[in-house]
Amino acid sequence: MSELETKSLEERFNQRIANDEKIEPKDWMPEKYRKTHIRQISQHAHSEIVGMLPEGNWISRCPTLRRKVALLAKVQDEGGHGLYLYSAAETLGISREEMFDQLHTGEAKYSSIFNYPTLTWADIGTIGWLVDGAAIMNQVALINTSFGPYGRAMIRICKEESFHQRQGFEIIMTLMNGTDEQKAMAQDSLNRFWWPALMMFGPRDADSPNSEQSMLWKLKRKTNDELRQAFVDQTVPQAELIGLTIPDPQLKWNEDRKHYDFGDLNWEEFWQVVHGHGPCNKQRLDARKNAWNNGAWVRDAAMAHAEKNANRELKQAV
Ligand code: BYC
């Protein structure tokens, strides 16, 4: 293709983005747009399936049958989200095998939050309330993302995350209506998860290499700092309502800004976790690699069965 032709395609593409038109898989798109989407969507998918692990850890230890039913459904939903997202990424020309390979070799990231351990039952409540709460904040904005399959996947994902957030908040609310020991367990869980939840939104805007271009392409509809602020503003009153204290001495309502001011995050911890040195990074990746290796015979059997059927159909046709 000549330089002139590429330029005119680029202009048309930028115009479509400016008009808020959805870009579909077979449409022309700049190579960098395609690659950036594969990166973000596949990392999002990896976060969903790695995110099943900390909660899966508590399925056999739920305090009641009702809690177990809800947690099972939630963890299965996360698996489903991973599958929609892998499918959305595949429409951009990457195979599922390649994506798993990138996860297993550490080339692709997944959300830092899932590298923290779930030590008590209260952590299951906190994950639903804060982690799914943060995910919704980010993903509602993504419904309007420019790439059609990604935005459409978000519609159903957000509905399910909303149920997850409520079941988590209800667990914490129940603990806060319980004994002193249960209240202390809920507070301890909030103390451990508050800062890592704020880190889910990514580095500060000034330190986010991908944000500027992703905002221009309307892949991201809000910046990392905007979403983090919206999450803090939404969550602080919820904590206060049930008697929990946010573990941030600098947290204060700012009447001029009409937002909460809050303390700085420990960015060194964030980057350590992102680069593979968090409390559970090795455990999480080992679990995923084992699942992949142990499932090899199922994939092989399914392929052999498909091949046998195809051959049979071919024989019948001739
Ligand atoms: N953790 O330039 P930036 C869920 C990386 S799961 C790890 O700001 P970007 C759930 C970033 O990838 C929900 N890495 O990047 C499941 C980049 O590295 P690369 C997960 C992070 O992409 C189970 C570098 O840092 N949600 O709901 O513009 C149970 C620089 O960052 C993190 C999504 O995935 C992090 N926290 O913005 C319960 C939402 N933050 O790739 C719940 C979709 C940043 O250049 N993703 N990095 O090597 C996004 O919205 C964006 O990708 C992010 C980062 C806001 C996360």
Image: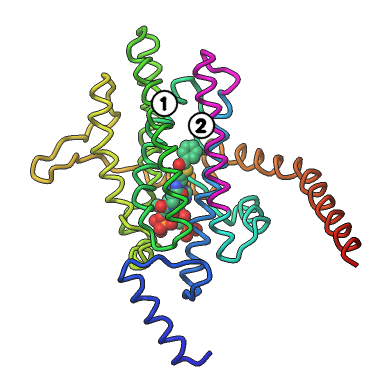
Q: Nearer the viewer, residue 222 or 114?
A: 222
Q: Which quarter of the picture shows residue 126?
A: top left
SS at mark 2? helix
Type of residue at label 1? Gln
Residue that extends furthest to the top in the rendered view of this protein? 179
Residue 54 lies in the magenta-colored region: no
Question: In the image, which residues are magenta?
Answer: 59-86
Q: Nearer the viewer, residue 113 or 278?
A: 113
Residue that carries the numbered disc 2 in the rendered image: 74
Give coordinates of residue 93: x percent, y percent: 60, 66
Point 35% across, 63% down: residue: 218
Q: Secondary structure at mark 1?
A: helix
| Residues at circles 1 and 2 in contact by the CB criterion of under 8 Å | yes
Specify the principal SS of the magenta part.
Answer: helix
Q: Is mark 2 within 8 Å of ligand 1?
A: yes
Looking at the rendered structure, which numbered label has been put on residue 52? none
- Determine the residue positioned at 53% across, 39% down: 78
Reply above or below: 218 against 135: below
> 140 or 200: which is nearer to us?
140
Q: Is residue 164 above or below residue 219?
A: above
Mark 1, residue position: 167
Task: Name above or below for residue 101 compared with residue 298.
Answer: below
Q: Position of residue 100 (x, y in %)?
A: 64, 52
Residue in view at x 52 percent, y 26 percent: 71
Q: Going by the picture, which residue comes out furthest to the left? A: 256
The quadrant the C terminus occupies is bottom right
Crowd band around label 2 with a 10 angstrom C-alpha radius: few (<14), some (14–19), many (20+)? many
